[in-house]
Image (cartoon, rainbow, N blue to C red):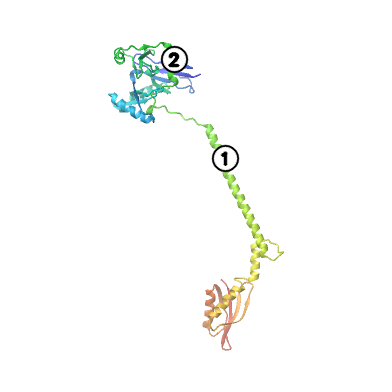
Amino acid sequence: MTDTLVLFLPTRTAPWRWLRLVGGKVFARGEGVPETGDGDAAPPVVIAPAEAVTLHWAELPDRSVAQAVSAARLLAADASAAPIAELHVAVGQEGGHIDRPIAVVSTAQMGAWLATLAGHGIDPAAMIPSPLLLPRPEQGYLRADFGGEAVVRGMVSGFADDAGLTELITGGVAPVLLGRDEIEASIGAVLAAPSLDLRQGPFARRQKRAIDWGLIRRLAWLAVAILGVTLLIGLAQIMKYSFAADSLERQADLLARQGLPRGETVSNADRQLDARLAGLRGGGAGFTATTAALFAAVRSVPGAEVRALTFEANGEMRVTVATENEGEVKDLLARLQAYGFAAESGVFQPVAGRLTGELRVRPR
């Protein structure tokens, strides 16, 4: 069952009072500031005296709380002699009625109340003006005595009972006096769904954020799942690359078998293919490429001719050439170097009116 402590702030004529409601009914009552119990107990609901709070009712926009409060502050500024900057304005909602209750209280008074309560170790769950503890009458006015503080409630009014002022406000209509049972039943009903709470805006109650261990555990499991999925993706990629490498290796082996002599065992396809290619074309740039470059160079020099040539296994070609003069030898060397070969000349001697000697041609 719901256990609610209701604490009445003191007035000029009444001390601290309190009620303890269990299941919406008064279970105990007393004067003074009661013990609030352990830290797990629900904070009390504090009742502000009617003499310090001015209540109004008006139709306000309900699109947002900020719009409603802004409109209420404009109304309060017109109806109050004090500067609006010194007033705290709170807006509520009373059932399905169009007109909404507006409470106006001094900012300094709100601060003083909360400071006094904090001195007693109390951070109230809500602060309700005492006239709003009474039900909204269908017509006329209701009057109740809260242990020394008498209040009057109309359809769109609520104020402290005063012998001279009440008659002027009610227009001479005598308020209906509520008995104790009716008052306590009304308090239980109002606390179940308060129509207005003064703890708004700068005086709103600060919510203590508890650590949600359940959420933390879920986030931890989510992080583990993300790491696990990331690891599985990495492993899948490694396996994919491994399978692809194996496939390429098999393809290279098949190609090597096609390029190598039939029956030869494949141990290192690259090395064996290079060896066979060198055997087929010769070392270096190969016999064909070297010979083509040599004869192209000889054709470009009019007086040169080839007498003999030898191609070595290391790709070097030895060529015996005959020229008319030393200038043609230098031209041959320049042509071969232009074709991308390194060429060196040996000793040239005159034979039958021509210079004959040996050139060594090899790839750079």
Q: Label 1's element?
A: helix
x and y percentages locating residue 106 in the rendered image: 33, 24
Q: Which residue is at the front of the view, 317 or 296?
A: 296
Residue closest to the far right: 263
Reading the image, the residue beneath label 2 is 185
Instruction: Report which quarter residue 73 is drawn in.
Output: top left
Q: Marks 1/2: CA distance?
A: 55 Å
The residue lying at 58 percent from left, 43 percent from top is 229
Q: Label 2's element?
A: helix
> Can you say whether 261 is above or below 198 in the image?
below
Task: Tell me whether circle 1 and circle 2 mark residues in contact (CB < 8 Å).
Answer: no
> Can you say whether 269 is above or below 191 in the image?
below
- Specify the label residue 175 is tagged with: none
x and y percentages locating residue 320 in the rendered image: 60, 81
x and y percentages locating residue 270 in the rendered image: 64, 63
Reading the image, the residue beneath label 1 is 225
The residue type indicated by label 2 comes to Ala
The residue lying at 64 percent from left, 60 percent from top is 252
Could you tell me which quadrant the C terminus lies in? bottom right
